[in-house]
């Protein structure tokens, strides 16, 4: 492969990153990642404290049991949020067409 | 009044447990974030469209810190003064729980950092590596989860 044909896909790649065929612009990607990261950080903490007060007042459990249920709930919510993010990242990011071919020729 | 059952130094161990749970897991998470962050920065120069996929190691390193936070909050919530019946045994249990989640988190963070760095750079060249990278990251992450489970188990002992 000549140096010419290496630089040509590079420039078209740069154009593609701003608006490729699924319409994920720079702003879309940023907002998606931001929302998911905030969800992953905030949701377990919120779950812990909401469960802590909700179960405690609702069921009248002992403080220790209450804490442990809340901790497990927080960890489960955390993993659901993480799995959601990985699913989104796996399915909604597209590779640039022709990149695999470019790799093989290198 | 502090007694032989509830000595004055009992809460020291509990406090150290709460602190070490947070400190060590934050160390692991920071290393994981920094190491995989350098990989992401190097990779994104050529393949900026893969940013969203390559953020995953950073997110997983952040989760390690949340494990430490959970255990730390649990321990801190049950700390008492020796006069209120905080025994030395409880202090030892809390220290053990804190060290379990803290050092497991440190190990998991190291693993996530190294795997994330190499995995992200590799994914830029061969996109099929992504599934493998996620699997390895999950196995690294699970090490921290084991620490969390043992810590909560220790915490529930009376």
Image (tube, rainbow, N blue to C red):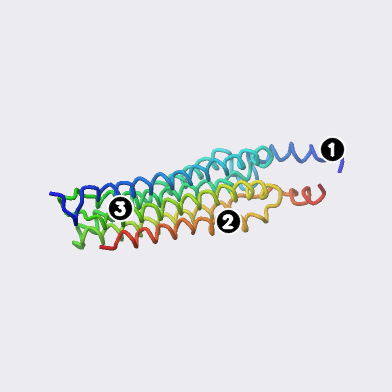
Q: Residue at x 49, y 58 (%)?
A: B143
Q: Secondary structure at mark 1?
A: helix
The chain identifier of the residue carrying mark 2 reads: B
Q: Which mark is residue B43?
A: none
Tell me if mark 2 has few (under 14), some (14-19) or many (20+) residues whose alpha carbon lies within 10 angstroms of its own. some
Instruction: Please state the chain letter of the residue tagged with numbered disc 3 in the rendered image.
Output: B
Q: CA distance from mark 3 to mark 1?
A: 60 Å
Give the x, y percent position of residue A22: 62, 48
Chain under disc 1: A
Task: Give yes or no for contact between labels 3 and 1 (Cβ–Cβ under 8 Å).
Answer: no
Q: Nearer the viewer, mark 2 or mark 3?
A: 3
| Distance in Å between CA atoms under marks 2 and 3 | 30 Å
Q: Residue furthest left?
A: B1
In the image, what residue occupies the spot 80% across and 40% down?
Answer: A6
Look at the numbered discs 2 and 3 and tell me whether their residues touch, using CB distance below 8 Å: no
Q: Which residue occupies 31% across, 54% down?
A: B94
Which tag is nearer the camera, tag 1 or tag 2?
2
Horizontal and vertical percent for residue B14? 29, 50
Would you say the residues marked 1 and 2 are in contact, meaning their CB atoms lie under 8 Å apart? Answer: no
In the rendered structure, the answer to whether residue B25 lies left or right of residue B155 reads right
- Estimate the x, y position of residue B153 in percent, counting from the top left: 34, 62
How packed mark 3 is, by other alpha carbons closer than 10 Å (few <14, some 14-19, many 20 or more), is many
- Residue placed under numbered mark 2 in the picture: B134
Circle 1 Cα neighbour tier, 10 Å, few/some/many (<14 / 14–19 / ≥20): few
Return the mark for residue B74. 3
Q: Quadrant of residue B5?
A: bottom left
Residue lying furthest right: A2
Quadrant of the image occupied by residue B130: bottom right
Tag 2's secondary structure? helix
- Left or right, residue B140 beside residue A44: right
């Amino acid at each position: 492969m000549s140096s010419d044909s290496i630089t040509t896909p590079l420039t078209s790649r740069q154009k593609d990153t701003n608006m490729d065929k699924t319409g994920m612009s720079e702003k879309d990607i940023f907002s998606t990642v931001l929302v998911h990261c905030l969800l992953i950080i905030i949701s377990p903490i919120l779950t812990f404290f909401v469960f802590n007060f909700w179960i405690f007042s609702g069921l009248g459990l002992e403080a220790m049991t209450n804490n442990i249920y809340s901790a497990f709930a927080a960890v489960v919510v955390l993993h659901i949020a993480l799995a959601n993010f990985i699913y989104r990242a796996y399915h909604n990011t597209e590779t640039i067409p022709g990149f695999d071919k470019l790799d093989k020729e290198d | 009044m502090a007694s032989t059952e509830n000595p004055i130094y009992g809460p020291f161990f509990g406090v150290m447990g709460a602190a070490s749970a947070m400190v060590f897991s934050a160390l692991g998470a920071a290393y994981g974030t920094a190491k995989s962050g350098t990989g992401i920065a190097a990779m994104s120069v050529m393949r900026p469209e893969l940013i969203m996929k390559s953020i995953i190691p950073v997110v997983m390193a952040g989760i390690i810190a949340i494990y430490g936070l959970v255990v730390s909050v649990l321990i801190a919530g049950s700390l008492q003064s020796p006069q209120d019946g905080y025994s030395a045994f409880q202090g030892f249990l809390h220290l053990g729980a804190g060290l379990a989640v803290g050092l497991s988190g440190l190990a998991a963070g190291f693993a996530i950092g190294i795997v994330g760095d190499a995995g992200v750079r590799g994914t830029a060249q061969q996109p099929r590596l992504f599934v493998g990278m996620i699997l390895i990251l999950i196995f690294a992450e699970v090490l921290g989860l084991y620490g969390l489970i043992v810590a909560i188990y220790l915490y529930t002992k009376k």
